[in-house]
Amino acid sequence: MVAPTDDLILQMRGITKDFPGVRALDDVTFQVQRGEVMALVGENGAGKSTLMKILSGVYPQYQGEIALDGDVRRFAGTREAEAAGVAIIHQELNLIPGLSVAENIFLGREPTRRLPGIVDWRTMRAEARKLLSRLDLSLDPRTLIRDCSIGQQQMVEIAKALSLNARIIVMDEPTSALTEHEIEQLFTIIRQLHGHGVTVVYISHKIDEIFAIADRVTVLRDGATVGTKPVGEVDHNAVVAMMVGRELTQMYPTRAAEPGRVLLEVEGWSVEDPVKRGAHLVRDISFVVRAGEIVGLAGLMGSGRSELVESLFGAPKGRVTGEAKIDGKPLDTRAPSRTIRQGLALVTEDRKRTGLVLGMSVGKNISMASLRELCRMGVINFRAERQLVEKQISGLRLKTPSVQTIINNLSGGNQQKAVVAKWLATEPRVLIVDEPTRGIDVGAKAEIYRIMNDLTAAGIGILMVSSELPEILGMSDRVLVLHEGRLAGDLARAQATQEKVMFLATGGR
């Protein structure tokens, strides 16, 4: 029995966790008061997710001590943690697409009738409807998860946690794929949970969210506890300095490159909707990207940003019309292999689904797009491959025990760095980056911004898609704004303000 202090619901003391070749946590202390919203922040690889996986029973083997309400506990699995009132909502949502909302909420705990094994569907759907109502979510419990938006799926995960009568809910990067409206809805729910005495541990790389929702913030760095502060006693810069061990006085580096000749020219570009006959995902878009220039591509979700860049890369969702040129020559968009050879590269927005092969090593993932240059008569030059990989790892400061480490074992931010490294290794003339810093901490963001600046200084043109307006405004020489698949505006850097971009993105004229 550990004596409760200041009504602490959770005490984690001396937590140490080792993986092969790396110590993920080193004597970490983490304490949370009952009913508060505690933010947990740190750079990628700092140990945030590992600490919460220990708390929730995912990693039962560790050194140290966990106490809930003063009682020392060691969970052998997630079921034990859930029974004790601890629920975790992972960054990668843990839902089954082919099952309904109600089935996902009560998976493994389905209410039954008198006969064992016979599901009481009416009761299950009624209980699911009550939980969804608490979240102000008008969603039919019979709806399949695959037919729900990411925001709705996030709410279903919260409903599942509520169904467990959780006293502590851990949210790991809950807003990474949400719209602004969905984020506000989530914050409202967190405040409601706070009002009902539920404790929330909130993990996020978005520092502004910490100040909007949290009571206190705990910072981890390199697997160790840096400190805990009330949010009213720190500012954005102070939190960042605790995270990275230094002040990031200029998040967005000065843009020194002067735009030169046209590298990418797009004229009358349209992409048909493969589902809705006669409809278009992208319609009649024209623009250019010059050497040494970063062109930001802004717009709300569903505006056609990703569909535009994917079609230019040779992976369209529907039939394409229009004309595109790179270095004055027609761009062959029949397949990504052809566009890559012409000097185009695309960092996709979903690293796990389209950016990486999760079962392969870090080195193989980085080199896979460059094998054509690394092979002689069908045989890979392994020495050249290793040099290429090590150069990219060093340049991006990618944290990995070795080039042979399976990439699925890296943190999300380091996985994202590996995707960027893969495409930089192809030495593209035009680099398209779709959400390049999604899931990356502030220190790594600054590094990627620096790399983008270095690329433009070397004469590369960059087309950058981002949902973060400060990123668009801070990095772009020009901003293209899409609305419902059409180009709503082409703004010079001096013209681009947050208000102007949002006005165009929402259909203003």
Image: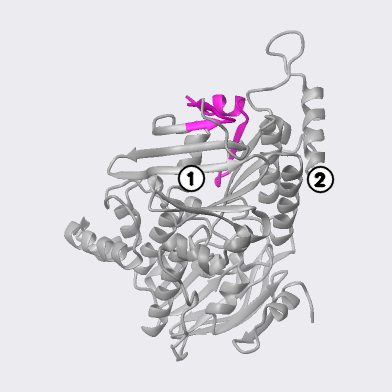
How crowded is the residue under tag 1: few (<14 C-alpha within 10 Å), some, or many (20+)? many
Above/below status of 427 relative to 410: below
- The answer to whether 382 appears left or right of 494 in the picture is left
The residue labelled by disc 1 is 49
Query: Does 80 appear in magenta?
Result: yes
Q: Residues in magenta?
A: 66-93
Q: Is residue 13 above or below residue 311?
A: above
Q: Which mark is residue 136?
A: 2
**Residue drawn 58% across the image and 75% down it:** 472
Horizontal side, residue 220 vs residue 497: left or right? left
Crowdedness of circle 2 by 10 Å Cα count: few (<14), some, many (20+)?
A: few
Relative side of 53 to 175, left or right: left
- 37 or 118, which is in the foreground? 37
Q: Is residue 359 visible?
A: no
Q: Nearer the viewer, residue 174 or 93?
A: 174
Amino acid, disc 2: Asp
